[in-house]
Image: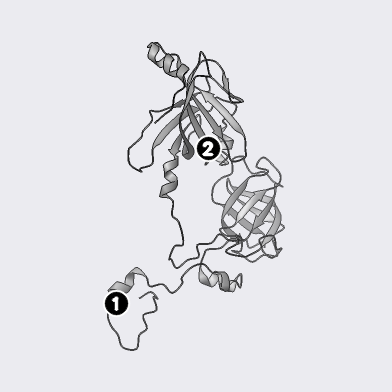
């Protein structure tokens, strides 16, 4: 239930209202942005809310149970604060959102309608649609360990224990030849075995993508001896020759990889011998151990 100030309640009781929607968005990098569907700038709590930004919201969808409430925000890439490059780089993912109902004639009369964060973003060349999820989505997140064959730790975190700053797992290179929008051959990585950086991360040090981190899909060795890197997705800006980057090892979460590549079986966070679904199809067989291996 919302608590309204006496002045705001009086404005509602008057019958003729002057309301606008305001959205305050705080990105993970700490930058704060304000948008409004009013036709002039509104300001309160140290935030200026930009008008006519091409930013508009759908109706609020709420339920009385613990289902995740949602609202869509649609917009065109008109505001200078919202760019296709920033959306592609993930800068808006998980941003905190406050939705306010404001009397544009007197912004001291306002009420916070809901809090949440930006979820899925669907974008095109000139427009985007962002899902605003309520805080109830936190109740839908898995908590605790997962019993699975693969490791559930993140390579390099405290549970894993691998130091990705170790030169054995970290390389620095430059783009030598562009192959596709997300694939290139690189110089400077000749000392690393093929596959080491598969499922790893790459951070751009120079060029149009400087500072952005992306995931690596494949790491191969060409017949010429140069490393061939394929990224999971094309970066926000076009890759250019001589762009420098730092790349770190990846892991497929398999027990054999943890043992043979990293010698880290003591910290393996999976259950490689857990019985699979096919176990229920087995029949008793003398001398055959039920160790969970594939039929």
Location of mark 2 (residue): 96
Q: Residue at x 57, y 73 (%)?
A: 266
Colour scheme in use: one colour
- Image location of residue 203, percent across then percent down: 65, 50
Q: Observer-nearest residue: 107 or 273?
A: 107
Q: In the picture, which quadrant includes the N terminus?
A: top left
Looking at the image, residue 245 lies above or below residue 250: above
Q: Observer-nearest residue: 19 or 242?
A: 19
Position of residue 197 in the picture relative to residue 287 (left or right): right
The first of marks 2 and 1 along the sequence is 2
Q: Is disc 1 placed on a helix, strand or loop?
A: loop
Nearest to the eye among marks 2 and 1: give it: 2
Location of mark 1 (residue): 282
Q: Is disc 2 placed on a helix, strand or loop?
A: strand
Q: In the picture, which quadrant includes the C terminus?
A: bottom left
- Image location of residue 127, percent across then percent down: 48, 30
Q: Residue at x 61, y 73 (%)?
A: 263
Asked if the residues shown at circle 2 and circle 1 are in contact, with their CB atoms under 8 angstroms apart, the answer is no
Q: CA distance from mark 2 to mark 1?
A: 50 Å
Q: Residue at x 44, y 62 (%)?
A: 146
- Image-quadrant location for residue 60: top left
């Amino acid at each position: 239930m919302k608590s309204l100030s006496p002045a705001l309640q009086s404005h509602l009781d008057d019958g003729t209202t002057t309301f606008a929607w305001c959205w305050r968005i705080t990105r993970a990098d700490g930058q704060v942005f304000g948008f409004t569907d009013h036709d002039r700038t509104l300001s309160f709590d140290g935030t200026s809310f930009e008008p006519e930004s091409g930013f508009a919201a759908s109706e609020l969808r709420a339920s009385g149970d613990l289902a995740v409430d949602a609202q869509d925000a649609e917009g065109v890439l008109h505001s200078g604060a919202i760019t296709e490059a920033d959306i592609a780089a993930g800068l808006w993912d998980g941003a905190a959102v406050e939705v306010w109902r404001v009397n544009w004639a007197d912004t001291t009369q306002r009420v916070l309608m809901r809090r949440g964060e930006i979820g899925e973003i669907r974008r095109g060349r000139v427009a985007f649609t962002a899902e605003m999820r309520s805080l109830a989505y936190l109740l839908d997140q898995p908590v605790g360990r997962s019993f699975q064959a693969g490791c559930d730790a993140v390579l390099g975190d405290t549970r894993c224990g691998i130091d990705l700053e170790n030169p054995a797992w970290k390389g620095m290179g430059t783009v030598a030849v562009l192959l596709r929008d997300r694939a290139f051959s690189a110089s400077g990585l000749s000392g690393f075995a093929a596959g080491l950086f598969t499922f790893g991360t790459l951070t751009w040090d120079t060029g149009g993508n400087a500072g952005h981190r992306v995931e690596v899909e494949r790491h191969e060795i060409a017949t010429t001896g140069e490393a061939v890197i394929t990224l999971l997705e094309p970066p926000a800006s076009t890759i250019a020759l001589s762009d420098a980057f730092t790349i770190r090892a990846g892991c497929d979460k398999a027990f054999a990889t943890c043992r043979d590549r990293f010698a880290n079986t003591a910290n393996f966070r999976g259950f490689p011998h857990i019985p699979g679904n096919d176990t229920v199809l087995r029949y008793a067989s003398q001398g055959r151990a039920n160790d969970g291996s594939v039929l």
